[in-house]
Amino acid sequence: METPKKILVIRFSSMGDIIYTTPVVRCLKEQLPNCEIHFLTKTQFQYIYQNNPYLTKLHTLKPKLSDTIKDIKAEKFDLIIDLHNNLRTSIIKLATGLPSSTYKKDRISKWLALKFKWNRFISKKHLVDRYLETVKFLGVKNDDKPIDYYISKAYNLSEFLPETHQQKFVAFVIGATHFTKRLPNDKIIEICKGINLPIVLLGGNDVKDNALIIQQAVGSNVYNTCGLTNLDQSVFLVSKAHKVIGFDTGLTHISEAFDRPLASIWGGTTPDLLGVHPYKISDSLIVGEDLSCRPCSKFGLEKCPLGHFKCMKNINPDIVVSFINS
């Protein structure tokens, strides 16, 4: 097809999946400089693109899909890049009649991995690379740069951290949407006690009580910001960290935009299943137990299906401590 002049990229959720679409938007704009690049997502995830310089316009999903379709028709796009590939995006493509290129999901291989633990069929390509396959026909190539996140304003560390934690600190992301993605408090405490640098705990109100328990057990080396900072401010703190520790959660994935050494700890989910191991960063560690019951879920669960939670309880804290202290 002719080089399009106006492209709509779609990904509705979730935080981690959307942050990995940013190389697609960047590559499209840099390699097709005369083309407008628009992005459509859910309202609660619009912050990821609000300050992105490669984006021409950001659109959000309306409560009625028909209203979203009406808006898309009014924009007169030349092409849709569908990076979500679900029922709603299929309806959008059908209703608008626009040419499209769609991200191919590994539904069968992921089902086999979850149901029978047959991991050999899962694609080894990172999610970013698989997203970029949708624009390859336009001559767009991977620029081999990290993901993008643009902080909304200029913050100062003194706004959020005491002087003891402003110079060289470790950001520990202790939150995650689902229980099976989170390391138990006692394991976090073990790791924190072994680290020889100041530690800043990051997370939302849902882990505020956990953070207080950890802070009390470890002492003044730990400073708690859980529930006290919004996401943009938390990203700022991650961007200034010496190293980062986190689980399979959005803030951990966003940290990759700043090329900080990252220790990512995985429980019921696995990076191979999701294709989201650390992307284009210079130093990283992936920690996860080799168990016959992993992965138990694609997105995480509210409790261990077998009741033992060995995927997190068996994690060796020394591995993480050694990486952070090295």
Image (cartoon, rainbow, N blue to C red):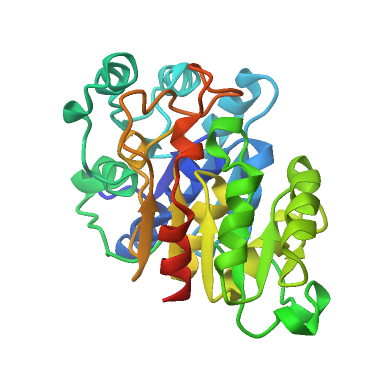
Question: In this orientation, which residue lies closer to the viewer: 2 or 326?
Answer: 326
Q: Residue at x 27, y 15 (%)?
A: 116
Q: Is residue 85 left or right of residue 231?
A: left
Residue in the image at 63% along x and 47% along y? 186
Which quarter of the rendered picture does the N terminus lie within?
Answer: top left
Question: Left of 304 or right of it: where is 132?
Answer: left
Is 304 drawn above or below residue 101 in the view shown? above
The residue at 35%/69% (across/down) is: 283
Quarter of the image with the C terminus in it = bottom left
Q: Position of residue 321 (x, y in %)?
A: 48, 65
The location of residue 282, given as percent across then percent down, is 34, 71
On screen, residue 159 above or below 246: below
Residue 290 rendering spot, x and y as whole percentages? 31, 36
Quarter of the image where one finds residue 142? bottom left
Quadrant assignment, res 200: bottom right
Residue 34 visible here: no
Q: Of residues 45 and 237, which is closer to you in this image?
A: 237
Q: Position of residue 246 (x, y in %)?
A: 53, 53
Q: Pick the residue in front: 93 or 10.
A: 10
The reply to whether residue 216 is in sight is yes
Residue in the foreground of this view, choosing between 49 and 223: 223
Question: What residue do we see at 52% from left, 47% from top?
Answer: 247
